[in-house]
């Protein structure tokens, strides 16, 4: 697979639609910061929605292998609970909350952000690039499965009220899922403002519902003894691997926790976990343990924690909570998509900012629509949370393993630990997560193929995009004219000059833009001021203001400008140009024309890619977001020059 030669190159591939480099940026805005405790409550509602609803089904599914022989022993119940509690401690608390949240890339998290850190530390790496590509693809699989299983598991609670409601479980689930995706355009902050308090109530309800059962049997605290977990694993053979696959359901959501870092910041997320989420989850799992020990025949221990009068309120609260659970991976998918666009893995997509005070809160309409369709299809096909449980773990475990691998590189190269010390810090997580992956691979034919198929499809799309961009770049270079040579030629025999400023966008500042050549060929005129503008994406989330814009004169009528933006920013070219006034560049938007090249791409007989890949690439290019909107250029100041190219 063709890989960008450097982070900058990765960030700024030529636009196959032929207009401008796909390098986003956003202007730094100064607004009043969001209060700390507002961020804490918001993170409870968005970041911990996924992991917070695991008690609905994780303990129930994890007990399945122990029930297989019809005899449920106390050691088996305590062993199952011990596995869940230690998984929460090792993977979520230590790996993610304590270690990975400190591996932010200027405040941003997620596997692609970690990939950028690791590649920077290694000076560029093809292997790390591919690992990040695979991890991102698996995360999207998680983002489609999570809403389906979460909402289904909550709505299924109405069957306990009366079996009459059973036929309505799927229609209600689909209606809730569609409504959830429709409100995404309101923005993360508004969604969090509603879901945050709801999830605080949810976590308190988890703990309070479990307390009476724990008081009836305080012996359940023995589950904190790791001996029970080890005894279960060593004494159940392959059945222990099956159980691990279900135990892992208790920690799904940890990767979304890391991906959502840019939405709320490290400290609010850590305080929310240690102060509320972790204690309440622990109490609930202990309460379910006590209930099953007292009534081994219990089939749905979560809902039976509450008295009969509290069942309907708990179903309603669980439904609201599972909608929130979906929010965690949806916002994570938005963040991941923007990073993928900036790193050149996906075509330009529309990105809307939904918060004036927090730049990480964004909405991508196209991603939102595709996720909604995927979630609805999965819910209709699998029809129950138990059926979907088999499809759930592979995507998450795969992403976690890849994250741990890149974390090792960051510890070693960026944090300057010795290779042995870095391995000692990361290896326990890799071992645990590898065991979880093995256990989930046993469920490939029961539904585990779903995330693998989804990830495979996304890898093909991303690889096609990267490869197509590379082929297109190589083809256009055959007819390229060095900018310095063109400027020298125009100075010797100047064409007619017209008043005003012309800005030509290009991905390579050393080559004359196609729009400039076509303007000279067909209009036979040149503006008084001509600017060759290149937008680059650096390997940090945000570019420093001092490095944002650089200008260089290359003749009486020509200048080169390079703008740099971080991969978490969205560009505003006119606003960035105003910074050049300090460097003596006079910029008046009303007397400036922006020239963009619009390329019409057609498949070639021999392109370097199979015909089916050519067609995928052309489709992606046609659906890329319009450069004028993406770079926030006034539509009335844009001139598009069309060319045709085969790929």
Image: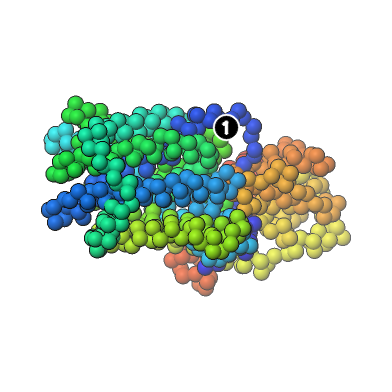
Q: Is residue 31 visible?
A: yes
Where is residue 453? Give x, y as percent: 35, 60
**Mark 1: few, some, or many residues within 10 Å (few <14, many ≥20)?**
some
Residue ID at (20%, 39%):
291
Residue at (64% x, 57% y) in the render: 8
> Among all residues in the image, which is located at the extreme top?
309
Horizontal side of 609 relative to 575 (left or right) equals left
Image quarter for residue 233?
A: bottom left
Assign the C terminus to one quadrant of the image.
bottom right
Residue at x 29% of width, y 42% of height: 221
State left or right for residue 558 relative to residue 128: right
Residue 153 seen: no
Relative to 624, does residue 457 appear above or below in the rendering? below
Question: Which residue does the numbered mark 1 point to in the structure image?
Answer: 357
x and y percentages locating residue 567 in the rendered image:
59, 49
SS under mark 1: loop
Residue shown at 30% from the left, 30% from the top: 208
Q: Position of residue 488 (x, y in %)?
A: 84, 61
């Amino acid at each position: 697979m063709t890989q960008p030669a450097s982070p900058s190159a990765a960030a700024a591939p030529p636009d196959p639609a032929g207009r401008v480099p796909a390098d986003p940026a956003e202007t730094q805005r100064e607004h009043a910061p969001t209060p700390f405790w507002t961020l804490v409550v918001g993170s409870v509602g968005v970041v911990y929605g996924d992991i917070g609803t695991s008690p609905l089904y994780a303990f129930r599914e994890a007990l399945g292998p122990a029930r297989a022989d019809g005899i449920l022993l106390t050691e088996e119940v305590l062993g199952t609970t011990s596995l869940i509690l230690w998984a929460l401690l090792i993977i979520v608390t230590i790996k993610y909350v304590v270690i990975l949240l400190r591996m932010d890339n200027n405040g941003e998290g997620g596997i692609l952000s970690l990939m950028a850190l690791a590649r920077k530390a290694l000076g560029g790496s093809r292997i790390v690039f591919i690992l990040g590509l695979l991890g991102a693809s698996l995360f999207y699989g998680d983002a489609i499965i999570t809403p389906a299983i979460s909402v289904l598991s909550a709505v299924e609670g109405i069957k306990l009220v009366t079996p009459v409601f059973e036929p309505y479980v799927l229609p209600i689930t689909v209606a809730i899922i569609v409504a959830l995706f429709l409100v995404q355009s309101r923005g993360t902050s508004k969604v969090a403002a509603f879901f945050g308090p709801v999830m605080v109530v949810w976590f308190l309800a988890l703990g309070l519902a479990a307390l009476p059962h724990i008081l009836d049997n305080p012996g359940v605290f023995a589950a904190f003894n790791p001996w029970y977990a080890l005894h279960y694993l060593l004494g159940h053979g392959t059945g222990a691997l099956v159980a691990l696959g279900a135990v892992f359901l208790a920690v799904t959501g940890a990767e979304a926790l890391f991906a959502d870092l840019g939405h709320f910041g490290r400290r609010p997320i850590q305080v929310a976990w240690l102060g509320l989420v972790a204690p309440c989850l622990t109490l609930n799992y202990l309460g379910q343990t006590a209930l099953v020990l007292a009534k081994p025949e219990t089939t749905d221990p979560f809902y039976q924690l509450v008295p009969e009068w509290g069942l309907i309120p708990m179903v309603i609260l669980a439904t609201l909570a599972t909608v929130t659970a979906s929010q965690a991976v949806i916002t994570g998918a938005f963040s991941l998509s923007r990073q993928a666009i900036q790193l050149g893995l996906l075509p330009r997509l529309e990105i809307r900012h939904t918060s004036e005070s927090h730049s990480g809160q964004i909405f991508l309409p196209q991603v939102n629509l595709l996720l909604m369709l995927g979630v609805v299809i999965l819910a209709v096909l699998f029809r129950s949370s138990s059926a979907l449980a088999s499809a759930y773990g592979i995507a998450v475990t795969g992403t976690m393993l890849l994250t741990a691998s890149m974390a090792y590189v960051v510890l070693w190269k960026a944090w300057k630990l010795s290779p042995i010390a870095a391995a000692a810090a990361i290896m326990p997580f890799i071992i645990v997560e590898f065991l979880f992956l093995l256990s989930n691979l046993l469920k490939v034919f029961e539904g585990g193929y779903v995330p693998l198929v989804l990830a495979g499809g996304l890898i093909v799309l991303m690889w096609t995009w990267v490869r197509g961009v590379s082929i297109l770049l190589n083809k256009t270079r055959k007819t390229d004219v060095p900018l310095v040579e063109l400027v020298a030629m125009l100075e010797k025999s100047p064409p007619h000059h017209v008043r005003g400023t012309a800005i030509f966008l290009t991905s390579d500042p050393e080559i004359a833009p196609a729009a400039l050549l076509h303007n000279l060929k067909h209009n036979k005129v040149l503006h008084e001021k001509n600017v060759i503008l290149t937008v680059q994406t650096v390997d940090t989330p945000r570019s420093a203001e001092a490095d944002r814009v650089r200008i260089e004169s290359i003749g009486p009528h020509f200048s080169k400008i390079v703008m740099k933006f971080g991969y978490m920013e969205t560009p505003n070219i006119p606003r960035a140009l105003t910074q050049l006034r300090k460097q003596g560049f006079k910029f008046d938007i009303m007397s400036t024309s922006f020239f963009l090249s619009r390329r019409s791409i057609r498949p070639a007989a021999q392109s370097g890619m199979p015909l089916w890949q050519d067609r995928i690439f052309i489709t992606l290019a046609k659906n890329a977001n319009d450069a004028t909107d993406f770079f926030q250029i006034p539509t009335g100041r844009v001139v598009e020059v069309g060319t045709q190219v085969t790929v």
